[in-house]
Amino acid sequence: MEWMKAAQQLRTGRRPGVLVTVMSVRGHAPREAGAKMVVASDNVWSTVGGGNLESVAVERCRAMIADGVVEPEVLEFALSDKAPYQHGVQCCGGEVKLLLEPLPVVPSVAIFGVGHVGLELARILARHDIELHLVDSRPDQLTASRLAVLDDAVAQVHVHQVPLLPELVVGELPPGTHALVMTHDHAEDAALCDAAIRNEQLATIGLIGSQAKWARFRRKLAEDGNSSKAIDRITTPIGLPDLPGKEPAVIAVSVAAWLLQQFSAERHPASARSAERRSTPAQREAKA
């Protein structure tokens, strides 16, 4: 079906769109209930009936895309010569309801280091509709048998086996990716952090480790010519500060919850700004 291919094309290209479905029809209408089309900012695939009905729907879809609307909407049309029209008369004689469902760009997460914590985190994140990139320099961490726990994933899982220079993957990640650095090797972590802060298109950069590790990394990153502003893009430690525990599953739950907060802020930026304004100075300092 054309609309299904279009929706997949938008997802692959990380472009937003809107799926339009004829919810119900009373009387005569140009298309039956269940007919669908997909609208992007610069294209339309398939049809829900043409004429004023479709033109109004396309205009509304493009406004939703421009405004970042994430909630579905319903449009109702009376196909009568007495009804007001914006794009010509459409007098089939029936009534039509259209459901407009946003097709947002799904979150993208890259886990560098699929060890004990990384795999537990991947298992949790795989239950969400995201693009999940798994990167490790150790081939034995990315075997089919080890990743079998992700076989029923909702997420689109991308496996990157890079025995040398895994930091090169940073430049291949989609814009807006949340990068998590948690490898087995501190030297590898440092190289990844350096590559990540030089990529201005990443949404967030998280580093697992102690304050002592971070102090050494800050010095090294500064010595390598990175500004304080760039270095401050790295969040460490990652996860929820009030969820203690060092077990891999606990850390993974904490980091996943932190990421879900980031996803929510991306979907509802106005709400996130409002929550930030309502927070106390002490809470804002704790976040900094």
Image (tube, grey):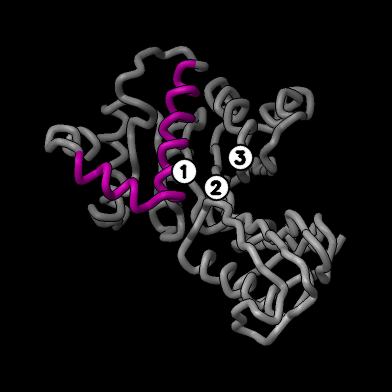
**Element class at badge 1:** helix
The residue under the point 49% across, 69% down is: 66
Question: Pointer 3: residues within 10 angstroms few (<14), some, or many (20+)?
Answer: many
- Viewer-proximal residue, 214 or 1? 1
Which comes before the other along the chain, label 3 or label 2? 2
The residue under the point 48% across, 30% down is: 256
Q: Is residue 155 left or right of residue 183?
A: right
Give the position of the N terminus as an image quadrant: bottom right
Residue, disc 3: 135
Name the mark on residue 263.
1
Q: Which residues are magenta?
A: 250-278
Which comes before the other along the chain, label 2 or label 1? 2
Viewer-nearest of labels 3 and 1? 1
The residue under the point 12% across, 38% down is: 281
Which comes before the other along the chain, label 3 or label 1? 3
**Are the residues flagged by discs 2 and 1 in contact, CB closer than 8 Å?**
yes
**Are the residues flagged by discs 3 and 2 in contact, CB closer than 8 Å?**
no
Question: In x, y percent, where is residue 212?
Answer: 27, 27
Amino acid type, label 3: Val
Q: Main secondary structure of the magenta part?
A: helix
Name the mark on residue 107.
2
